[in-house]
Image (cartoon, rainbow, N blue to C red):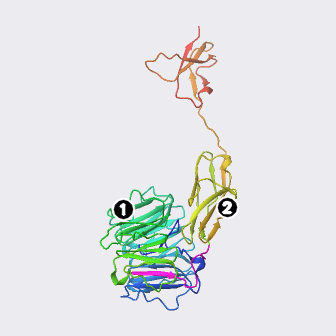
Amino acid sequence: MFKIIFAACCLGAVPAFGPRANAQTQVIAWGDNTFGQTNVPPNLTNVVAIAGGQYFNMALQGNGNVVAWGASEYGVTEVPSKVTNVVAIAAGGEIGVALLNNGTVVAWGYNSNGLTTDVPSNVTNVVAVSAAYFHCLALRNNGTVVAWGNDYLGETDVPPNLTNVVAIAAGESGYSLALRNNGTIVAWGDNTLTNVPSNLTNVVAIAAGDNHCLALRNNGTVVAWGYNDYGQTNVPPNLTNVVAIAGGDSFSMALQGNGNVVAWGASFYGVTNVPVYLPFAQAISAGDTFGVALVNPGQPSGSEPPPTIISQPQTQTDGMNATATFRAFAYGFPPLSYQWYFNGTNAIAGATNSALTLTNLQPSNIGAYSVAVISPGGTTISSPALLNVLPAVGINLVPAISLYGGVGLSYSVQYINALGPTNAPWTTLATVTLTNSPQFYFDVTAIGQPARFYRIVQVP
């Protein structure tokens, strides 16, 4: 929970607008300031991503450093010295999580059930992170999810067959969300929040609030479900052109393509009263009862940078008739779209997701595969991934029949495909004169055929 989620295969708290962050970028926070969480450090510059927790804030700078401020309970605002070369951040209730550029994860703060000290050993090759009060999620570059921490409601029981995930979100009240590359959502944990609307498709981003969920569709509209005691799931009817979403304690936020921020739901501490002086926003995040925006006053709408590919498709070798899947993970100014190519210039029809799956591989599939990631800021082409298809070797069993009889006598070798009350005649394979007893006879006609029953009949 409590983090920004971007569109179309963007990854957790990965900075959506990192390439255009510079000294002009500013962090603006509003709402609850009981612990100084909206007192942004005055010299904070070059910010590329933001994340709000319960009573604290985090910012990721372009040099890979993390800055935290607000409540210092459990040392959450004391960023460990080993947190360097960071590419993504997430903030839970009182924990901070950082994804390093080597694909590993560091967590600090509240250590309930080993949240910060018992990060699982298989949390490697990570491309996105998400954190709630009592559990964390990590998305690996193979599209699978790892969870750790408390499991009171099954929130860390990742469905065993969950694959092709492109975004994750951890919810405070014990639930988890995963967005698959086909635009559908998988939820587990608290049953009151895992009832994803049955008609919800074409999703490009997800967010988890305290007790409600948000989904952004590829047409720029928002769908919400879960608790609605403060109107947090009452999406404004005229809300369109949304490019990012975030959820806090009983309130919701949306960032529109023109840089406007819209908030609705609980108005604790004025959190839904977005500052009128807020300049063009690039990213949003929702803390417990405060909002955060990353803005760039000198960056007008319409001058967004092209997307960045953070996980390139990988070269692979497979056998004939096998299945191969290529994946690319990217972030950038949403919405993002994809087009896969074969051998550089041949667009593959219908291949417009972040993953490309090829079935029934043949030698004609051998070649280079690349993907173009397209955003309002331009197009970025991945490095080519080579596919090699190994030739097939057909291995078929040839029945070896042992013939017993008199040496020098001749026998008719016969077969039938099924035994039982049938008038089907036996078929003669050959007439064999025994030189040994027993003697092998190989039925080469049985390759690829149904099961056979055999008999020998002496030839007069």
Which one is nearer the viewer's eye here, 271 or 460? 271
Q: Residue at x 38, y 87 (%)?
A: 33
State whether the magenta stretch is mostly helix, strand or loop: loop
* Residue numbers of the magenta segment: 290-305
Q: As drawn, which residue projects farthest toward the bottom?
A: 42
Q: Residue at x 57, y 63 (%)?
A: 337
Name the residue carrying label 2: 384
Which one is nearer the viewer's eye here, 190 or 147? 190
Q: Residue at x 63, y 38 (%)?
A: 394
Q: Label 2: state its secondary structure.
A: loop
Badge 2: how crowded within 10 Å, few (<14), some, or many (20+)? some
Q: Is residue 304 magenta?
A: yes
Q: Label 1: state its secondary structure.
A: loop
Name the residue carrying label 1: 194
The quarter of the rendered structure image containing the C terminus is: top right
Residue 74, percent from left and from top: 39, 83
